[in-house]
């Protein structure tokens, strides 16, 4: 059984999507050109960058804090953000080298007919409640004959 981890680069995902399977912690990493390998540290060292480990359906990605922030922001709602199981598209600015920028955008699930049906039912119920409230408000504005008589007896 081969347990080797497959790493992928954002550059190979441009124009494609990936789904986050598991978001891990971070490590400090630096590419060493002489040995042609990635140096890893659990503590900060000069020249190392903080990289977050994200396991995806396309392999493992090492993302910087700005890139991770972009993923989390894509699904942020009411103080919570969960990217596990979420899909993102990858685009770039078309440049190369140090000028390249990657854009990670959330991919939303298309609405189904059931979703539309549920939405239509909620709108219909809301409209019923509005009509009922308007009816009650009008009733509240109309005085009964007894109330009219009482008001007519007030001397001022």
Image: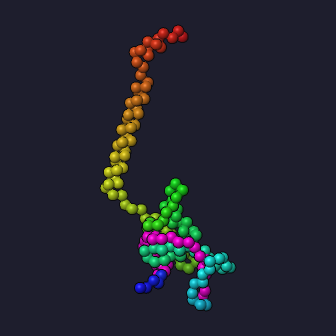
Is residue 118 among the parts visible in the rendering?
A: yes
| Nearer to me, 22 or 103 | 22
- Is 3 covered by the magenta stretch? no
Q: To which quarter of the image does residue 50 belong?
A: bottom right
Residue 96: percent from left, percent from top: 53, 78
Residue 23: percent from left, percent from top: 51, 70
Image point (59%, 76%), residue name: 27
Image point (58%, 69%), residue name: 65
Indicate the quadrant containing the C terminus: top left, top right, bottom left or bottom right. top right
Q: Is residue 68 left or right of residue 141?
A: right
Q: How many marks?
A: 0
Image point (52%, 54%), residue name: 78
Residue placed farthest to the front in the image? 1
Indicate the quadrant containing the N terminus: top left, top right, bottom left or bottom right. bottom left
Residue 14: percent from left, percent from top: 46, 74
| Nearer to me, 154 or 104 | 154
- Is 15 covered by the magenta stretch? yes
Residue placed farthest to the bottom in the image? 34
Q: Magenta residues, as a range?
A: 6-33
Residue 55: percent from left, percent from top: 48, 74
């Amino acid at each position: 059984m081969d347990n080797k981890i497959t790493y992928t680069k954002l550059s190979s995902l441009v124009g494609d999507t990936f789904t986050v399977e598991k978001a891990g912690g971070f490590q400090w990493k630096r590419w060493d050109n002489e040995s042609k390998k990635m140096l890893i540290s659990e503590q900060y060292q000069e020249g190392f960058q903080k990289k977050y480990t994200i396991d995806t359906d396309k392999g493992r990605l090492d993302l910087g804090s700005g890139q991770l922030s972009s993923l989390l922001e894509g699904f942020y709602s009411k103080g919570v953000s969960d990217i596990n199981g979420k899909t993102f598209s990858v685009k770039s600015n078309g440049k190369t080298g140090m000028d390249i920028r990657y854009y990670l955008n959330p991919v939303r699930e298309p609405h189904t007919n059931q979703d539309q049906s549920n939405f239509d039912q909620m709108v219909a119920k809301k409209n019923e409640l509005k009509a009922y409230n308007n009816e009650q408000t009008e009733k509240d504005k109309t005085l009964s004959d007894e109330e009219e008589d009482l008001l007519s007896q007030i001397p001022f």
